[in-house]
Image: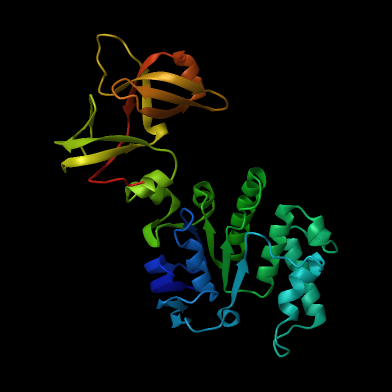
Amino acid sequence: MTIEVQHIRKQFGQFTALDDVSLKFPDGQLTALLGPSGCGKTTLLRVIAGLEHPDSGAVLLDGEDASHRHVRERQVGFVFQHYALFKHMTVFENVAFGLRVKPRKERPSEQQIRDKVRQLLELVQLDWIADRYPPQLSGGQRQRIALARALAVEPRVLLLDEPFGALDAKVRKELRRWLRRLHDELHVTSIFVTHDQEEALEVADQVVLMNKGRIEQLGTPDAVYNKPASPFVYGFLGNVNLFHGRVQDGVLASGDVKLDVPQHAGSGEGIGYVRPHDLDVERYTPGEGDKGGVVAKLRRAHAIGPLAQLDLERADNQQLIEAVMPNELFARHGFREGDTLVVKPRRIEVFVDAGEGI
């Protein structure tokens, strides 16, 4: 099913949750609505489901206006963050619930219900706990059962609101991979809400980054991460170093440092954005200048695992710079805390007149 929202506006009192949002969700794809708390992503999901009514705008399902359709008529499956399973029902009965409450004319036979539930429990790899009750399950198991229950009614759209938000990091990572595999098998048009950038970039086909009720950027995970459209996107998707200064003639003058930004023809006050892994770090040699980089003192190095994380303090203004490099390279250089180093951006993106940005 293709989903489209057109010019959706929604206010709660004086707070604008959605501000003229228009979007298309491709058929059969998994789309992540990503952004900070209060950006409007859950409200948008609820508007699509029919659980919330917009002040204006339309929701189209397969090209037809579904704005006034009841939740049951939209054929959506909904999975909440906190499972919402019936504690007094077994796992089997929880999954069967949506089938049993269908109108008599649409309700499958008891044997069909049993076969369907068994298939779904096998799909989520939990057929061996059909007789248990939700309190007897782990958080990850409960969320998989909630997903099986949502799939039981054969929804044309699957909506997930922070589905793994209540789980610990290890279980979240396992379930992310599992959800991606499940989606590749079922190809149900799916939308999930998350504030976890790693989750969105790892699982989704398409990422919609939201901020203050508006869409900041829409694209593939690779596109939004490697080609951010705004300072907000740059700052939200991973760590980033900021170099404030003035841009002119392809150079960003930041403090005592001049950084080449040949791709930027504009001029004015701006901010250069550099990700920690886009920095080269060399030893500073007195008398050789800054070699086109930033002179900084190594304040702390966290060299555990495959990557070494370096906290460096600029010599000209004490601003902190974060750099990341392979641990093998860090050991080869023999850097020590207190050493004076030179940091050179391999890639820098400049936004002129960016204001606060993030």
- What residue do we see at 57% from left, 66% from top? 159
Rendering coords of residue 317 (x, y %)? 30, 25
**Up-down: is 321 above or below 135?**
above
- What residue do we see at 50% from left, 72% from top? 48
Rendering coords of residue 51 (x, y %)? 55, 74
Tell me if I can see residue 107 in this picture. Answer: yes
**Up-down: is 26 above or below 237?**
below
Rendering coords of residue 166 (x, y %)? 64, 52
**Up-down: is 306 above or below 218?**
above
Left or right: 127, with 168 as reference point: right
**Up-down: is 22 above or below 70?**
above
Left or right: 125, with 295 as reference point: right
Number of numbered markers: 0
- What residue do we see at 29% from left, 37% from top? 272
* Residue 291 lies in quadrant: top left
In the rendered image, the residue lying farthest to the left is: 249
Rendering coords of residue 66 (x, y %)? 48, 81
Tell me if I can see residue 264 in this picture. Answer: no
Report the coloring of the rendering. rainbow
In the rendered image, the residue lying farthest to the bottom is: 105
* Residue 143 lies in quadrant: bottom right
- What residue do we see at 35% from left, 28% from top? 319
Left or right: 29, with 55 as reference point: right
* Residue 134 lies in quadrant: bottom right
In the rendered image, the residue lying farthest to the right is: 131
In the rendered image, the residue lying farthest to the front is: 14
Please name whichever residue, 100 or 108, is drawn nearer the observer in this view of the structure: 100
